[in-house]
Image (cartoon, helix red, strand yellow):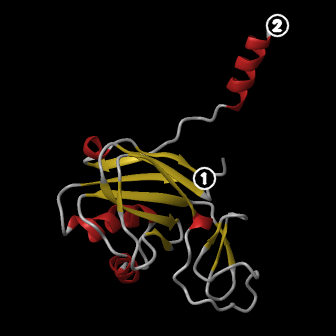
Amino acid sequence: MTSAMVLVLALAAVQRPPLDVIKTGEVERYGPGITHASHRVLKYELIRPAHVVVLLVSDHGEVQAVFPERTGDKTEKKAGRHGLSVGDVASSLPAYRVEGAPAEAKPGRFLPQSGTRVTASGAVVEMEGTYWLLIAADVPTTALQVLAVIEARDRSAGVAELIEGLPRALVGVRTTSWATYVTQAVER
């Protein structure tokens, strides 16, 4: 067996299955969207400049604003490839410790290292059934607008209802040009 054949076989063994992304809205205008998603990292591609909102949504109805998260965050991204890591985004939550939570945990935040989430009570919840939601639009959305929509959401809504309703509430009332991309956060 030649070294080229060994290399081809090795690459074939580590190839991952294609990412299953649900795309809605004007996806032809904004591009392919999510290209990689793990519990910790999201990569996406835009074919034109767009204002971006990134959320993590769980089967349990929990929603975490990943971007924008701070008031001054500029949401417009240029055409091209982009990525972010949950660990790269600073928290807007006050720096206090919740009794019973791991020392590095912040309440209301997903813990990318372990694939779990710390709740305000300090309980750790598994991240199975967590989805990345990427929204691309022609209008900016501030961190305060994202927080207001998250707070006003129907707490009894299922993940499908949240994934459909959050983009509409965030940008659908202000523009007709937007696209959403959804995929499950899986360990890759």
> Circle 1 — which element?
loop
Q: Residue at 36%, 65% (x, y): give it.
A: 75
Label 1: how many Cα within 10 Å (few below 14, some 14–19, many 20+): some
For disc 2, the marked residue is 1
In terms of image quadrants, where is residue 150? bottom left
Q: Residue at 65%, 31% (x, y): give it.
A: 15
For disc 1, the marked residue is 38
The image position of residue 121, as x and y in percent, is: 65, 89
In the depicted structure, whether residue 160 falls above or below residue 91? above
- Specify whether 128 is left or right of 166: right
For this orientation, the residue located farthest to the right is 1
The image position of residue 185, as x and y in percent, is: 57, 55
Name the kind of residue labelled 1 in the image: Ser
Q: From the viewer's side, name the closer residue of 75 and 156.
A: 75
In terms of image quadrants, where is residue 171? bottom left
Q: From the viewer's side, name the closer residue of 112 and 52.
A: 52
Label 2: how many Cα within 10 Å (few below 14, some 14–19, many 20+): few
Name the kind of residue labelled 2 in the image: Met
Dividing the image into 4 quarters, which one contains the N terminus? top right
Q: From the viewer's side, name the closer residue of 71 and 60.
A: 71
The image position of residue 94, as x and y in percent, is: 57, 90
Q: Residue at 23%, 65% (x, y): give it.
A: 172
The image position of residue 3, as x and y in percent, is: 79, 12
In the depicted structure, whether residue 43 falls above or below residue 103? above
Specify the label residue 78 is tagged with.
none
